[in-house]
Amino acid sequence: MRKFVALLIVLAVLLSVGISMAAESQKLSTSPKQKMVDRNGDGKIDGVDIYDESGKVVKRGYDTDGDMKVDNWQTYDENTGTPIVVQSDSAFLLQ
C-alpha cells in the first residue's frame, strides 16, 4: 500500500512538472514580443527574434551548431536597426 501511495505521488509530481513545462513552452512560442524562427529553412527552430512594443526587432538569438539552443545573440540599435552588440556563449549562459 505504501509503495502504491509513493508511486501516485511520484506520478502526480511528474504530471505537474510536465504541465508546467508545456505551459511555459506555449507561453514562449505565442508571446507577441518573441518569435521562434527557422533561419536556414530546414524545418527546425534555430533562432528567436525579440521585439519591442512597436514591433521592431531589438534582439536576435541564433543556434549556430544545430543543437536547438541559442548560443549567439545580436542586440540591435532601436533607432537604426543595426547590430550593436554581438555575444557568443558556448555555455549557454547568455539570455
Image (tube, rainbow, N blue to C red):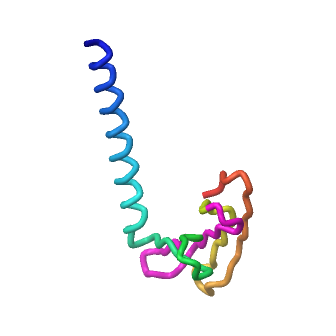
**The residue positioned farthest toward the top in the image shown:** 2
Q: Residue at x 71, y 51 (%)?
A: 91
Query: What x and y, as percent, mark residue 36?
Result: 49, 71
Q: Residue at x 58, y 82 (%)?
A: 41
Residue 51 drawn above or below residue 80: above
Task: Determine whether, in the image, residue 33 is placed left or right of residue 44.
Answer: left
Q: Residue at x 37, y 60 (%)?
A: 27
Query: What x and y, as percent, mark residue 54?
Result: 43, 81
Count of marks, rendered view? 0
The front one of 63 and 52 is: 63
Q: Is residue 62 magenta?
A: yes
**The residue positioned farthest toward the bottom in the image shown:** 80
Task: Determine whether, in the image, residue 50 is placed left or right of residue 88.
Answer: left
Quadrant of the image containing the N terminus? top left
Task: Determine whether, in the image, residue 82 is placed left or right of residue 25.
Answer: right
Quadrant of the image containing the C terminus? bottom right
The front one of 49 and 29 is: 29
Residue 57 sits in quarter: bottom right
Residue 71 drawn above or below residue 85: above
The front one of 12 and 57 is: 12
Query: What x and y, as percent, mark residue 73?
Result: 66, 67
Q: Is residue 9 magenta?
A: no
Q: Residue at x 63, y 63 (%)?
A: 70
Residue 55 sits in quarter: bottom left
The front one of 91 and 46 is: 46
Provide the residue span drawn in magenta: 48-67
